[in-house]
Every structure is written in C-alpha cells, then in structure tokens.
Amino acid sequence: MIFAFLKIAFRNILRAKRRSLITVSAVGFGLGALIFIWAFVDGAHRQMVENYTSLIAGHIQIHKQGFSQKEQLEMNFSRPEEIIAKLTRLAQVKAVSPRIKAFGLVSSAEHSSIVSIMGIVPQKELSVSRMSDRVKEGKFLEDNKSIVIGERLAKNLNVSLGDKVVIMSQALDGSIASAAYHVNGLLDTGADEIDKGVALITYTAAQELFVMDNKASEIAVRINSAEDARIVSRMIANDLNSPDLEVLAWQDISPMLYQWVEFDNGFIWIIVLVVMIVVAIGILNTVLMGVLERTHEFGILLALGTKRRQVISMVAFESLILGIVGSIAGLGLGCVSSLYYGKAGINLSAFTQALNNFYMDAFIYPRLSFGHVATSLVLVLIISVVVSLYPAYHAANLKPVDAIRSI
Amino acid sequence: MLIKTINLTKTYTIDGDIQTPALRGVDIVIDKGEFVAIAGPSGSGKTSLLNLLGALDTPTSGSIFYEDIDITKIALNALSGFRLTQIGFVFQAYNLINTLTALENVEYIMLLKGVSADIRRKKAVDILARVGLGDYINRFPRHMSGGQQQRVAVARSIAAEPKVVLADEPTANLDSKTAESLIELMKELNAEKGITFIFSTHDKMVMDKAKRLINLHDGKVVS
C-alpha cells in the first residue's frame, strides 16, 4: 500500500513540474549552501588550531603544576628524558620536544626589549612545531651561539642577520644569566606576540644560560589529531601519574582560541536555523498550494473510504520525495563545491592581517565532515516531513461533501 | 430491508444565520438488490439525500439504518471504513483520480481494502472489460471521453463489492445515447451481481429505466 501511495505522491509532484522544480532547487541550494558553509567553518577551525598548535604551542604541553599561570623559571621539572621516554611509547603521540622558557631582556647596541626566551632542540622541534618554516630571512637555529627572533623584534632592536644581541636574565641558581648570540634567522609568523616578543635559542644554550642542571620547563607534544588533544592529555596525565605536573591540551593552553572555535560552532547553528526556515517555507509553499488546489480530489479520496492517516501519509510522501530529490541535488552541490575549494582554497588575501590574528592563512580550505553533512541531510529530510504535517492535517480533516463541491 | 431512513431532515445554515431546509422528514425503505431512481426537480433534495445515504454528510435530525446499524451514530473517523466496505459511489462529474490510470482508479478501492496486488489487478482488468473498457485500462482520465470516464467510475464503484452503489445524476453530463448505455450497464450489473443501485436524476429516459421511483419535492417524498 505504501508503494501505491508513493506512486500517487510522485505523480502529483510531476503534475506541478515547475513548482516542484522550484522547491527542489530551494532545498538543493539551501542544503548545498549549508554543507559548504559548514565545511568552510570546519576548514577554518582546522587551520586555526593547526596553525596555532604547529606554530609554537604543540597539541599538548607538560609543565610543573602552575607553570601555565606564572611561567617562572623556578617551576621546572627534573629528568625530562624519563617523561619523554614514557610519552613516546603512546601510540597517539607523534613527536615530543623538551623546552626551557624564561623571560629576559634582549639587547642590541641601541635598544632592548623584554621577551620570552625559549630554549628548544631544533631537530626535535621540527616534528612538534613549524617554527622553522616561519623563518623569513636567514636560517633556523644552527649552533649554541645562534638566536632566532621575530622580524618585528629585530626591527625594534634595529638588528639584522649576523648582528650580535645579548640576553640578560636571572639563572635558576640566582646568578645573572647573560650571553651573547648572533642573529641567525628572522621569524615572520603574522602573530604579533611571537614576532615582537619571542627569542629562540638552543636547548643546550638555554641549559647553560639558566644553569638548569638538566631540568626543563616544558615538554611539547604533537599527537595524531588535534581533535583528540583533551582525551590524550588525560591519558598522559594518568600515565605519568604525577600530581606535580600539569598536562594541558591546546584548548587549555589557549582558552581564547578554543572559545572562538566554540563560539563559531554555536553560531553555525543560527545559519542552520535560517537555512532550515528557507527550506521549510519552500516545501510548505509547494505542498500547501498543492493540497489547496486538490481539495476536490482529497474529497473524492475521503469519500471513497481513504482513511485520514492514509491522506496524511500521501501528503507527507510528496513532501518527503521533494526533500529527498532536493537533498540529492544539495548533497552534490555542497560536496562538489567543498571538495573543489578544499583543494583550490578560497582566497581571502585581502584580509590577511585580520586572519593572521586568528592564526588563519590567506587561503581557507573547506573541509567536509561526515557528521556535519549527515546532520544537514537528516535535518532537511526531517523538516521536509514536519512542514507537510499542517497541509496533510488540513487535507485529512476535510469534510468529503464540502471538499467534493469545491472546484 | 437494506436501507431505512426515519424522519430524516437536513437544514443548511448559510452566512451564519440563514436556515435553508433541504430535507424535511424523509422516510424511505430500500431493499437489497433494488434499482431505484430518486427523481425530482433541481433543489428538491436529491443530492442531499444521497449524501446522507452515502455517509458523506450528517443529518440535522433523523436516522439512517443500514440493515441494523444506525450510521448517524457512527463516529466520523469510522465512517470512512463504512463507506469503503458498504458503499460505491458514482458522481455526476465522474470524479476519477486524475493522476491514476483507469486500471489504477478501479484498483484504488481494492488497495484501500488490502486486496493483494495480483488479485486486485486481475479483478480490475476483468471489471473494466465488463464495462467495455478493456482496451483503455492504461489511459488517464484526461485522455478519455465523458462516457468512458463514467464507465470507469461505475467499474470503480463495484470493485469492492459494496452492498449499494449511490449515483448522483450519473448521466447529467452525458449525451442521451451514452446516458442510456450507462444506465443499461448499471441495470445489467444490478441484475448480475445483485448490488443495490440508487441514483438520482431528473431525466425522463433514465427514470423510465428504474425499477422503482422515489419522487422528491421540496425535501419531501411525494410518491
């Protein structure tokens, strides 16, 4: 019986070809736009998180408890190599690198500036972050006497490649930490806080400068997927089982970035709502018009003995068919456009400065998510049936004798 | 006795307060297998009476018995089931479902009754052949003449083997030759299958074909 009602519904759709085509187009365009916008937002988020975590932070950071709040040299931990050995045994962990972090004064012959000094292991850092990719001039750290600073810091200090700068700070033992380095490379990350406020030296040089006695301030971890950072960070905390250490996922390291992503994820539902309203109005218009036009026919069907629920099914089927056909078109439109721009990228270079502040590049690459495509599809199909209930109820409750009289 | 009405009245309310009586106490009895014409001029209440007998409308007062069942007491929701199993309809304007072929229109009633696809198809083909439309089974109503459409309507009305077929001025839109042929067909089916036929008309030729005539005037049975 369902097949017969489907057949009737299908023929009714074909009976009003132009109107059905407009509805299918509205559904298709709405769903296609929704899939594309969602893919765009997902792609932008992925880029933001990837750029942020790969630029300097890493996916997960391990510190002495409280370090993330104060960033003091005294908040360090011993035997980092033992922690690194434990971490590398975890399947989810791709790379690990120890760091020393301290604040200090970097001076040239003319100017000085307070910066965050980071001691890193260049070879290991290549797998954890992409700082080396951001060297615009010169080279990355090559020896224990080299320093890499931001391009804007270099400008402030009025130094260029090969020039000497001096770092002054306080060592762990309370002595004055002071050493001279030659500028080996200039960073251009687009993020002001790094380009103006970070100086990179080697881990060995930092050990000597701050008299660390093989202690570290931080271990940066790169895992297989940034999305799993919270889960893996909990796993690592359990594995290390040390209350003295804090294990932070990128969401904890940069709550602002995380909140921005979450805000965006919330905002997209407003777009979903708007698209659903457009789709609902499109389908409701067609189905309601169709029902009103066919009042006479519904009168006959009811007179012949068609039950109310069967009339409701018939109308709902029409709506569902329109929804399915429109959804197929929308899926094609949304997926093809997302895949195309996922490779070609969307050029937003006109907004580079603003994008850089959110760790985004000039090109955004939409990224299809099965979950979001499925959600969009299911919502459209549900909407297409739900909006048909009013016209269906109207048709089912017609009084046969009155409905037959109508032309 | 198949159908019995007791003091049946129907009054329409127009524009909220104007009362227009269409039936003013109709008492009729129709037996199984009868071939009855309800005659009378326009406005005499023929269509109102058929609508009430067909459970398409509710009376203002009075009762309608189908054998022992007073259908005025049946809930509105259950009336569709009653119509499906007990009554076949032929309308003046044919009222076929335009998106269905002749065959599918005839099958539709059996579909609602849950008859399996094979059986209903075979039966629909047989009935259409019986009403002389064996070569037209796959035609849509818009590709058929008025006479052919009304024959499909007659075929549809008997497809579910109802106890009674109610036909509201079935020949009104047909030329006299086609009208005569349609009434002959109904008469043959009445004889063959024992189905009671009740039809309204104001056509003298059609009245002459009826085995019994009920005359209505101003909403009352006059003879």
Image: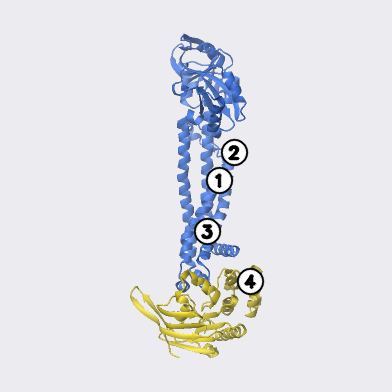
Chain colours: A blue, B yellow
* Label 4 to label 2: alpha-carbon separation: 56 Å
The residue labelled by disc 2 is A343
Which of the 4 image quadrants contains residue A232?
top right
* Element under disc 1: helix
Task: Looking at the image, tell me whether mark 2 or mark 1 is earlier in sequence order.
Answer: 2
Which of the 4 image quadrants contains residue B107?
bottom right
Q: Nearer the viewer, mark 1 or mark 4?
A: 4
The residue labelled by disc 4 is B120
Q: Position of residue A74 (x, y in %)?
A: 47, 16
Q: Nearer the viewer, mark 3 or mark 4?
A: 4
Q: Residue furthest left?
A: B17
Q: Amino acid at mark 3?
A: Ser
* Label 2 to label 1: alpha-carbon separation: 18 Å
Q: Nearer the viewer, mark 2 or mark 1?
A: 1
The residue labelled by disc 3 is A319
Please rate how many residues cluster around mark 3, counting C-alpha atoms within 10 Å: few if below 14, some from 14 to 19, many from 20: many
Q: Chain of mark 3?
A: A
- With respect to residue A269, does A117 lie above or below? above
- With respect to residue A383, does B125 lie above or below? below
Please rate how many residues cluster around mark 4, counting C-alpha atoms within 10 Å: few if below 14, some from 14 to 19, many from 20: many
The residue labelled by disc 1 is A373
Q: Residue at x 52, y 47 (%)?
A: A33
The mark found on residue A363 in the picture is: none
Please rate how many residues cluster around mark 2, counting C-alpha atoms within 10 Å: few if below 14, some from 14 to 19, many from 20: few
Task: Looking at the image, tell me whether mark 2 or mark 3 is earlier in sequence order.
Answer: 3
Q: Position of residue A384 (x, y in %)?
A: 51, 55
* Element under disc 2: helix
* Element under disc 3: helix
Q: Amino acid at mark 2?
A: Lys
Q: Is residue A13 visible?
A: yes
Q: Position of residue A353 (x, y in %)?
A: 47, 31
